[in-house]
Image (cartoon, rainbow, N blue to C red):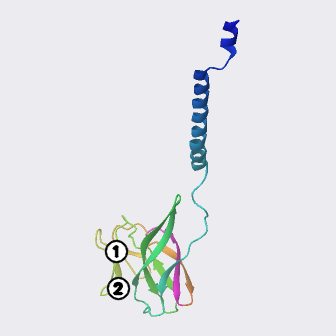
Amino acid sequence: MSSDQSSSAPTRRGFYVAAINGLMAIVSGALAIPAIAYLFSSGKPSNDKQWVDAGDISKLPPGSPVKMVFQRRRTDGWRVLTENGSAWVVKKPDNQVVAFGPNCTHLGCAYHWEPDRKDFLCPCHTSVFNIDGNVESGPAPRPLDRFETRVDGTHLLLGDLRTSTEQRS
């Protein structure tokens, strides 16, 4: 009779094994829930178009490109980063504004405005672009990329950088 009672009665060792297994299940669940949420959720809250204030354009001289520096916020997963950016802004005589991306379309080097030549020049590979962003000479395969622009009062707002789809003729 004592052998039947000892096999059906809970033992101290059995209790501890069950308690340890229960605690391990609780800890595993507590770690698994955030991991699953991380894997199946997107960190980017929205895809709203972001317009960035590049600055006041009221004092820009027409027909003379000016490099404008601005700050843009970018979401990388759950982190929000603030990055510096730049654009070459040309104010046309009719007060239209064009903003070119800061990189040459050949290999992405930084170019600059040459006031004496009245051209944009990429010093790395000698690509030359006119004031409208079109290729004058050099290995660049297409015109300069342009930002979407919007003018709010006297401030220039920049949208996405659009890659030029035209090919050099």
Give the image location of residue 69, x and y in percent.
Answer: 41, 79
In what quadrant of the picture does the C terminus appear? bottom left
Give the image location of residue 38, x and y in percent.
Answer: 57, 49
Q: Is any part of residue 165 visible from this angle?
A: no
Q: Is residue 28 above or below residue 42?
A: above
Front in this rendered view, residue 49 or 46: 46
Q: Name which residue lies at 40% across and 85% down.
A: 65
Residue 161 — which label?
Answer: none
Front in this rendered view, residue 24 or 15: 15
Give the image location of residue 81, x and y in percent.
Answer: 47, 66
Between the C-alphas of marks 1 and 2, the distance is 13 Å
Front in this rendered view, residue 105 or 160: 160
Taking 129 as reference, is 76 left or right? right
Give the image location of residue 167, x and y in percent.
Answer: 46, 67
Based on the picture, tell me whether residue 164 belongs to the magenta stretch.
Answer: yes
Residue at the disc numbered 2:
118
Dot 1 or dot 2: first in sequence order is 1
Q: What secondary structure is found at the residue carrying circle 2?
A: loop
Based on the picture, tell me whether residue 89 belongs to the magenta stretch.
Answer: no
Disc 1 marks which amino acid?
Answer: Tyr
Taking 133 as reference, is 4 left or right? right
Q: Which residues are magenta?
A: 154-168
Q: Is residue 14 above or below residue 96?
A: above
Residue at the disc numbered 1:
111
For disc 2, the neighbor class at 10 Å (few under 14, some 14 to 19, many from 20) is some
Front in this rendered view, residue 108 or 26: 26
Can you tell which quarter of the image residue 88 is in?
bottom left
Q: Name which residue lies at 57% across and 34% down.
A: 24
The reply to whether callout 1 and callout 2 are in contact (CB within 8 Å) is no
Q: Name which residue lies at 47% across and 79% down.
A: 99
Disc 2 marks which amino acid?
Answer: Lys
